[in-house]
Image (cartoon, rainbow, N blue to C red):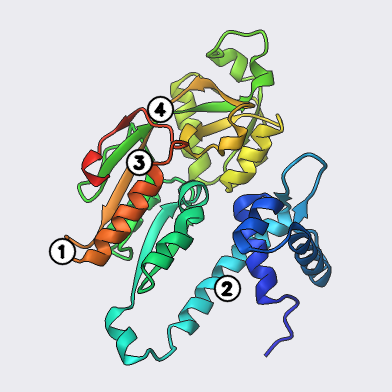
Amino acid sequence: MPNLPFTLRQLEVFSSLCATRSFRRTAEALGISQASVSNQMKALEAQLGVALFARRPGQRPALTAEGMAFFDDLQVFQAAAETLASHRRKRPEEAEQQVRYRVLIGQGLLDGYIRSKLDRFFAAHPQIELAFEAHPPSRELARDVESGRFDFAMIHQRADRPVEPYLRQLALVRGGIYGHRKFADGRQLPLPAEMLNALPFIMPLAASAQEAEMLRLFDRYGIRPRRVIGHTQYYDVMAAMLERGVGVSSFADAILPTEMREQVIMLHPLENWRLLWYRKDAGGDPRCDAVQAFLVSSVLQDSNYRTITVFADEFL
Protein backbone atom coordinates (compact mmCIF):
# COMPACT_ATOMS: atom_id res chain seq x y z
CA MET A 1 0.00 0.00 0.00
CA PRO A 2 1.30 3.51 -0.77
CA ASN A 3 2.25 5.86 2.04
CA LEU A 4 -0.54 8.41 1.53
CA PRO A 5 0.28 12.09 2.24
CA PHE A 6 -3.05 12.67 4.02
CA THR A 7 -5.40 11.22 6.61
CA LEU A 8 -9.07 10.40 6.17
CA ARG A 9 -9.87 13.08 8.72
CA GLN A 10 -8.03 15.67 6.64
CA LEU A 11 -10.03 14.63 3.58
CA GLU A 12 -13.26 14.96 5.56
CA VAL A 13 -12.33 18.48 6.68
CA PHE A 14 -11.21 19.44 3.16
CA SER A 15 -14.47 18.15 1.63
CA SER A 16 -16.56 20.07 4.18
CA LEU A 17 -14.56 23.26 3.65
CA CYS A 18 -15.08 22.98 -0.11
CA ALA A 19 -18.84 22.80 0.52
CA THR A 20 -19.13 25.58 3.11
CA ARG A 21 -16.22 27.87 2.13
CA SER A 22 -16.27 28.86 5.78
CA PHE A 23 -13.92 27.72 8.56
CA ARG A 24 -16.64 28.53 11.11
CA ARG A 25 -19.38 26.55 9.35
CA THR A 26 -17.04 23.62 8.75
CA ALA A 27 -16.09 23.60 12.42
CA GLU A 28 -19.78 23.63 13.41
CA ALA A 29 -20.67 20.87 10.94
CA LEU A 30 -17.85 18.59 12.13
CA GLY A 31 -18.09 19.47 15.83
CA ILE A 32 -14.51 20.72 16.09
CA SER A 33 -12.86 24.10 16.63
CA GLN A 34 -12.01 26.57 13.87
CA ALA A 35 -8.36 26.28 14.90
CA SER A 36 -8.55 22.53 14.31
CA VAL A 37 -10.01 23.08 10.83
CA SER A 38 -7.21 25.52 10.01
CA ASN A 39 -4.52 23.23 11.41
CA GLN A 40 -5.85 20.21 9.49
CA MET A 41 -5.76 22.18 6.23
CA LYS A 42 -2.29 23.60 6.87
CA ALA A 43 -1.02 20.09 7.61
CA LEU A 44 -2.67 18.67 4.47
CA GLU A 45 -1.18 21.41 2.28
CA ALA A 46 2.25 20.91 3.84
CA GLN A 47 2.07 17.14 3.27
CA LEU A 48 1.00 17.61 -0.36
CA GLY A 49 3.37 20.48 -0.99
CA VAL A 50 0.70 22.62 -2.69
CA ALA A 51 -1.75 25.34 -1.66
CA LEU A 52 -5.32 24.04 -1.87
CA PHE A 53 -7.03 27.27 -0.81
CA ALA A 54 -6.37 30.94 -1.44
CA ARG A 55 -6.88 32.76 1.86
CA ARG A 56 -7.34 36.53 1.92
CA PRO A 57 -8.33 38.70 4.91
CA GLY A 58 -12.07 39.33 5.02
CA GLN A 59 -12.82 36.87 2.20
CA ARG A 60 -13.95 33.26 2.11
CA PRO A 61 -11.35 30.64 1.25
CA ALA A 62 -11.38 29.87 -2.49
CA LEU A 63 -10.01 26.76 -4.16
CA THR A 64 -6.80 27.19 -6.10
CA ALA A 65 -6.25 25.33 -9.39
CA GLU A 66 -4.44 22.62 -7.42
CA GLY A 67 -7.30 22.55 -4.92
CA MET A 68 -9.87 22.07 -7.70
CA ALA A 69 -7.88 19.19 -9.17
CA PHE A 70 -7.51 17.60 -5.71
CA PHE A 71 -11.27 17.98 -5.13
CA ASP A 72 -12.03 16.24 -8.44
CA ASP A 73 -9.78 13.32 -7.54
CA LEU A 74 -11.30 13.18 -4.06
CA GLN A 75 -14.70 12.42 -5.62
CA VAL A 76 -13.17 9.40 -7.36
CA PHE A 77 -11.47 8.36 -4.11
CA GLN A 78 -14.72 8.60 -2.15
CA ALA A 79 -16.63 6.59 -4.76
CA ALA A 80 -13.98 3.85 -4.59
CA ALA A 81 -14.13 3.89 -0.78
CA GLU A 82 -17.91 3.45 -0.88
CA THR A 83 -17.50 0.48 -3.22
CA LEU A 84 -14.96 -1.13 -0.90
CA ALA A 85 -17.17 -0.49 2.13
CA SER A 86 -20.10 -2.22 0.42
CA HIS A 87 -18.25 -5.53 0.84
CA ARG A 88 -18.82 -5.38 4.60
CA ARG A 89 -20.97 -8.31 5.63
CA LYS A 90 -24.17 -7.10 7.20
CA ARG A 91 -25.80 -8.68 10.21
CA PRO A 92 -29.00 -10.59 9.42
CA GLU A 93 -31.18 -7.89 10.96
CA GLU A 94 -29.43 -5.23 8.87
CA ALA A 95 -29.79 -7.12 5.59
CA GLU A 96 -33.54 -6.75 5.67
CA GLN A 97 -33.67 -3.11 6.71
CA GLN A 98 -30.69 -1.31 5.21
CA VAL A 99 -31.25 0.32 1.83
CA ARG A 100 -29.02 2.55 -0.29
CA TYR A 101 -30.40 5.07 -2.78
CA ARG A 102 -28.46 6.93 -5.48
CA VAL A 103 -29.42 10.58 -5.81
CA LEU A 104 -28.51 12.84 -8.72
CA ILE A 105 -28.62 16.43 -7.53
CA GLY A 106 -27.50 19.91 -8.50
CA GLN A 107 -24.35 20.95 -6.66
CA GLY A 108 -25.96 24.19 -5.46
CA LEU A 109 -28.98 22.33 -4.12
CA LEU A 110 -26.83 19.87 -2.19
CA ASP A 111 -24.53 22.51 -0.71
CA GLY A 112 -27.14 25.16 -0.03
CA TYR A 113 -30.20 23.22 1.07
CA ILE A 114 -29.62 19.50 1.65
CA ARG A 115 -26.24 18.93 3.27
CA SER A 116 -26.95 20.91 6.47
CA LYS A 117 -30.11 18.87 7.13
CA LEU A 118 -28.71 15.41 6.43
CA ASP A 119 -27.66 14.71 10.02
CA ARG A 120 -31.24 14.92 11.23
CA PHE A 121 -32.52 12.74 8.38
CA PHE A 122 -29.95 10.01 9.00
CA ALA A 123 -30.65 10.09 12.73
CA ALA A 124 -34.37 9.59 12.03
CA HIS A 125 -33.80 6.93 9.34
CA PRO A 126 -30.67 4.90 10.25
CA GLN A 127 -31.63 2.18 7.77
CA ILE A 128 -31.42 4.55 4.78
CA GLU A 129 -28.18 5.48 2.99
CA LEU A 130 -28.12 8.28 0.41
CA ALA A 131 -25.28 8.35 -2.12
CA PHE A 132 -25.28 11.77 -3.79
CA GLU A 133 -23.81 12.56 -7.19
CA ALA A 134 -23.70 16.35 -7.53
CA HIS A 135 -23.22 18.29 -10.78
CA PRO A 136 -23.72 21.82 -12.14
CA PRO A 137 -26.72 22.28 -14.48
CA SER A 138 -26.33 20.87 -18.00
CA ARG A 139 -28.34 19.20 -20.75
CA GLU A 140 -26.72 15.88 -19.90
CA LEU A 141 -28.33 15.65 -16.46
CA ALA A 142 -31.79 14.81 -17.83
CA ARG A 143 -30.20 12.06 -19.93
CA ASP A 144 -28.42 10.73 -16.86
CA VAL A 145 -31.79 10.45 -15.13
CA GLU A 146 -33.23 8.54 -18.09
CA SER A 147 -30.39 6.02 -17.87
CA GLY A 148 -32.02 4.54 -14.76
CA ARG A 149 -28.82 4.70 -12.67
CA PHE A 150 -30.46 6.91 -10.06
CA ASP A 151 -33.31 6.31 -7.63
CA PHE A 152 -34.00 10.02 -7.17
CA ALA A 153 -33.00 13.21 -8.92
CA MET A 154 -33.45 16.90 -8.17
CA ILE A 155 -31.95 19.23 -10.75
CA HIS A 156 -32.35 22.67 -12.31
CA GLN A 157 -33.07 23.03 -16.01
CA ARG A 158 -33.57 26.18 -18.06
CA ALA A 159 -37.25 26.94 -18.54
CA ASP A 160 -36.98 27.23 -22.32
CA ARG A 161 -36.26 23.51 -22.62
CA PRO A 162 -39.01 20.87 -22.74
CA VAL A 163 -39.59 18.79 -19.62
CA GLU A 164 -39.06 15.10 -20.24
CA PRO A 165 -42.07 12.90 -19.30
CA TYR A 166 -40.13 11.09 -16.58
CA LEU A 167 -39.40 14.40 -14.77
CA ARG A 168 -41.79 16.32 -12.53
CA GLN A 169 -41.72 20.13 -12.32
CA LEU A 170 -41.59 21.35 -8.73
CA ALA A 171 -40.94 25.08 -8.98
CA LEU A 172 -39.76 27.97 -11.12
CA VAL A 173 -36.91 30.27 -10.03
CA ARG A 174 -35.36 33.40 -11.53
CA GLY A 175 -32.34 33.33 -13.79
CA GLY A 176 -30.21 36.14 -15.15
CA ILE A 177 -26.82 37.77 -15.32
CA TYR A 178 -25.62 38.49 -11.78
CA GLY A 179 -22.79 40.61 -10.53
CA HIS A 180 -21.63 42.86 -7.70
CA ARG A 181 -23.90 45.85 -7.15
CA LYS A 182 -20.97 48.13 -8.00
CA PHE A 183 -21.64 47.35 -11.68
CA ALA A 184 -25.09 48.96 -11.29
CA ASP A 185 -24.07 52.07 -9.32
CA GLY A 186 -25.85 55.09 -10.80
CA ARG A 187 -27.40 52.99 -13.56
CA GLN A 188 -30.96 51.88 -14.14
CA LEU A 189 -31.63 48.14 -14.09
CA PRO A 190 -31.74 46.03 -16.09
CA LEU A 191 -28.47 47.03 -17.72
CA PRO A 192 -28.74 47.18 -21.53
CA ALA A 193 -26.93 44.57 -23.60
CA GLU A 194 -24.33 47.01 -24.93
CA MET A 195 -23.32 47.92 -21.37
CA LEU A 196 -23.17 44.27 -20.29
CA ASN A 197 -20.95 43.42 -23.25
CA ALA A 198 -18.21 45.66 -21.86
CA LEU A 199 -18.21 43.99 -18.40
CA PRO A 200 -15.78 41.20 -17.40
CA PHE A 201 -17.49 37.80 -17.71
CA ILE A 202 -16.89 34.54 -15.86
CA MET A 203 -17.78 31.50 -17.96
CA PRO A 204 -17.93 27.71 -17.64
CA LEU A 205 -14.90 25.71 -18.74
CA ALA A 206 -13.49 26.95 -22.02
CA ALA A 207 -14.68 25.10 -25.14
CA SER A 208 -17.10 23.02 -23.03
CA ALA A 209 -20.70 22.24 -23.95
CA GLN A 210 -21.80 24.40 -21.02
CA GLU A 211 -19.92 27.42 -22.33
CA ALA A 212 -21.32 26.99 -25.84
CA GLU A 213 -24.82 26.69 -24.42
CA MET A 214 -24.38 29.84 -22.32
CA LEU A 215 -23.10 31.81 -25.31
CA ARG A 216 -26.12 30.74 -27.38
CA LEU A 217 -28.40 31.94 -24.60
CA PHE A 218 -26.58 35.27 -24.37
CA ASP A 219 -26.82 35.74 -28.14
CA ARG A 220 -30.61 35.50 -28.00
CA TYR A 221 -30.58 38.53 -25.72
CA GLY A 222 -28.05 40.45 -27.80
CA ILE A 223 -25.33 39.84 -25.21
CA ARG A 224 -21.88 39.17 -26.69
CA PRO A 225 -19.15 39.37 -24.02
CA ARG A 226 -16.04 41.11 -25.27
CA ARG A 227 -13.92 40.25 -22.22
CA VAL A 228 -13.85 36.86 -20.47
CA ILE A 229 -11.63 36.97 -17.38
CA GLY A 230 -12.07 33.42 -16.07
CA HIS A 231 -13.49 29.94 -16.59
CA THR A 232 -14.67 27.55 -13.87
CA GLN A 233 -16.93 24.53 -13.57
CA TYR A 234 -17.60 25.19 -9.88
CA TYR A 235 -20.64 27.28 -9.04
CA ASP A 236 -19.26 28.22 -5.61
CA VAL A 237 -16.02 29.51 -7.11
CA MET A 238 -18.03 31.52 -9.62
CA ALA A 239 -20.26 32.88 -6.83
CA ALA A 240 -17.19 33.92 -4.83
CA MET A 241 -15.85 35.80 -7.85
CA LEU A 242 -19.20 37.57 -8.25
CA GLU A 243 -19.15 38.60 -4.58
CA ARG A 244 -15.64 40.01 -4.90
CA GLY A 245 -16.70 42.05 -7.91
CA VAL A 246 -14.26 40.26 -10.22
CA GLY A 247 -16.85 39.77 -12.96
CA VAL A 248 -20.43 38.87 -13.90
CA SER A 249 -22.03 35.62 -15.01
CA SER A 250 -25.26 33.76 -15.69
CA PHE A 251 -26.71 32.39 -12.46
CA ALA A 252 -29.92 31.06 -10.90
CA ASP A 253 -31.15 33.20 -8.02
CA ALA A 254 -31.98 30.21 -5.84
CA ILE A 255 -28.45 28.79 -5.76
CA LEU A 256 -26.74 32.09 -5.01
CA PRO A 257 -25.49 31.67 -1.40
CA THR A 258 -27.76 33.67 0.91
CA GLU A 259 -24.87 35.55 2.52
CA MET A 260 -23.97 37.01 -0.87
CA ARG A 261 -27.38 38.32 -1.87
CA GLU A 262 -26.88 41.77 -0.40
CA GLN A 263 -23.88 42.46 -2.63
CA VAL A 264 -24.64 40.26 -5.68
CA ILE A 265 -27.71 41.32 -7.65
CA MET A 266 -29.41 40.56 -10.95
CA LEU A 267 -28.12 42.95 -13.60
CA HIS A 268 -30.18 41.57 -16.48
CA PRO A 269 -32.93 38.88 -16.56
CA LEU A 270 -32.46 35.81 -18.73
CA GLU A 271 -34.40 32.55 -18.95
CA ASN A 272 -35.78 31.31 -15.66
CA TRP A 273 -34.97 27.85 -14.27
CA ARG A 274 -37.21 24.91 -13.46
CA LEU A 275 -36.64 22.74 -10.41
CA LEU A 276 -37.25 19.17 -11.61
CA TRP A 277 -37.83 15.98 -9.66
CA TYR A 278 -37.49 12.29 -10.46
CA ARG A 279 -38.32 9.18 -8.48
CA LYS A 280 -37.73 5.70 -9.87
CA ASP A 281 -39.97 3.89 -7.38
CA ALA A 282 -43.60 4.13 -8.41
CA GLY A 283 -44.79 4.38 -4.83
CA GLY A 284 -45.67 2.18 -1.91
CA ASP A 285 -42.26 1.90 -0.22
CA PRO A 286 -42.34 4.06 2.93
CA ARG A 287 -38.56 4.47 2.81
CA CYS A 288 -38.82 6.03 -0.67
CA ASP A 289 -41.62 8.24 0.63
CA ALA A 290 -39.36 9.38 3.48
CA VAL A 291 -36.53 10.27 1.08
CA GLN A 292 -38.89 12.17 -1.20
CA ALA A 293 -40.42 14.12 1.67
CA PHE A 294 -36.98 15.01 3.00
CA LEU A 295 -35.42 16.15 -0.27
CA VAL A 296 -38.39 18.14 -1.53
CA SER A 297 -39.19 19.83 1.77
CA SER A 298 -35.51 20.62 2.44
CA VAL A 299 -35.54 22.81 -0.65
CA LEU A 300 -39.07 24.13 -1.08
CA GLN A 301 -39.72 24.80 2.60
CA ASP A 302 -36.44 26.65 3.03
CA SER A 303 -37.17 30.39 3.00
CA ASN A 304 -33.83 31.04 1.30
CA TYR A 305 -34.97 29.13 -1.79
CA ARG A 306 -36.77 32.00 -3.52
CA THR A 307 -39.32 30.82 -6.08
CA ILE A 308 -41.51 32.48 -8.69
CA THR A 309 -44.03 29.63 -8.62
CA VAL A 310 -44.33 26.31 -6.76
CA PHE A 311 -46.12 23.46 -8.57
CA ALA A 312 -45.81 20.71 -5.97
CA ASP A 313 -47.96 21.66 -2.99
CA GLU A 314 -49.10 18.05 -2.59
CA PHE A 315 -45.48 17.03 -1.87
CA LEU A 316 -45.25 19.30 1.16
Q: Dot 3 lies on which element?
A: strand
Q: Which residue is mark 1?
A: 284
Q: Is residue 129 left or right of residue 179?
A: left
Q: Nearer the viewer, mark 3 or mark 1?
A: 1
Name the residue rendered at 32%, 60% in the picture: 291
Q: Choose the circle earlier in sequence order: 2 or 4.
A: 2
Residue 205 appears anywhere in the view: no
Give the quadrant of the C terminus.
top left
Q: Which residue is mark 2?
A: 77
* Residue at the disc numbered 4: 271
**Up/down of 52 relative to 248, above or below:** below
Hey, which quadrant is residue 249 in on the image? top right
Q: Amino acid at mark 1?
A: Gly
Decide if residue 141 is on the left or right side of residue 311. right
Identified at 66% across, 60% down, the residue is 69
In space, the residues marked 2 and 1 are separated at their CA atoms by 35 Å
Sequence order check: which comes first, mark 2 or mark 1? 2
Residue at the spot of label 3: 275
Within 10 Å of disc 1 (Cα), the crowding (few <14, some 14-19, many 20+) is: few
